[in-house]
Image: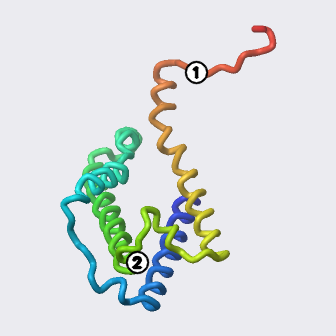
């Protein structure tokens, strides 16, 4: 839950900086290129990266109290996720235009709030790793494979 709070906080601050930048430099959003054939491979690479949590989905289905509602929950979650992703990307591109860096935090000014945002974003991502590793632990438990630390008697 803390990871989600950190990520949401960081996203709101980044969006605030985007609107501030657009107010200061409105000319950046005048001639935006909305489609480029040369950017299609990059688009699919980013899309695959954004939807890489496939291993978690199966275990979420298995651990639900009412698995018959899984499809509704999955569709609702994906619609919300895609909407937030598209809105955030569109706001960043609208704000910075062709000057938008690959990582949007590189466009932010260098101040204390930006540093806090970057740290919060890192903690948010770090906190999501245990959930991504959940399938690995469940497979290990199911197959009775446990990592054991060597004891002094084994030396």
Q: Examine the image and state in which quarter residue 63 appears.
A: top left
Quadrant showing the N terminus: bottom right
Q: Answer yes or no: do the residues labelled 1 and 2 have beta carbons within 8 Å? A: no
In the image, 69 versus 26, the foreground residue is: 26
Tally of numbered tags: 2
Q: Tell me the crowding category of disc 2: few under 14, some 14 to 19, or many 20 or more residues within 10 angstroms, Cα based.
A: many
Rendered residue at 45%/27% (across/down): 139
- Residues under labels 1 and 2: Cα distance? 50 Å
Q: Element type at marker 1?
A: loop
Rendered residue at 40%/42% (across/down): 56
Q: Which residue is mark 1?
A: 146
- Extreme-top residue of the structure: 154
Q: Is residue 39 above or below residue 105?
A: above
| Horizontal arrangement in the rendering, residue 17 relative to residue 85 (left or right) | right
| Horizontal arrangement in the rendering, residue 42 relative to residue 37 (left or right) | right
Q: Is residue 35 above or below residue 127?
A: below
Q: Nearer the viewer, mark 1 or mark 2?
A: 2
* Image coordinates for residue 52, horizontal then vertical, percent: 37, 46
* Image coordinates for residue 75, horizontal then vertical, percent: 26, 56
- The numbered dot on residue 107 is none
Q: Which residue is mark 2?
A: 96
């Amino acid at each position: 839950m803390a990871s989600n709070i950190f990520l949401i906080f960081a996203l709101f601050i980044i969006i605030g900086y985007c609107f501030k930048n657009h107010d200061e430099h409105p000319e950046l959003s005048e001639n935006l290129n909305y489609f480029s054939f040369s950017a299609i491979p990059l688009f699919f690479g980013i899309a695959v990266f954004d939807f890489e949590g496939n291993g978690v989905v199966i275990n979420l289905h298995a651990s639900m109290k009412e698995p018959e509602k899984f499809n509704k929950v999955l569709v609702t979650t994906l619609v919300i996720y895609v909407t937030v992703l598209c809105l955030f990307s569109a706001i960043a591109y609208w704000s910075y235009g062709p000057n938008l860096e690959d990582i949007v935090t590189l466009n932010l000014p260098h101040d204390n709030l930006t540093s806090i945002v970057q740290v919060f974003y890192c903690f948010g991502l770090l906190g999501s790793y245990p959930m991504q590793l959940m399938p690995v632990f469940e497979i290990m438990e199911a197959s009775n494979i446990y990592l054991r630390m060597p004891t002094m008697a084994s030396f």
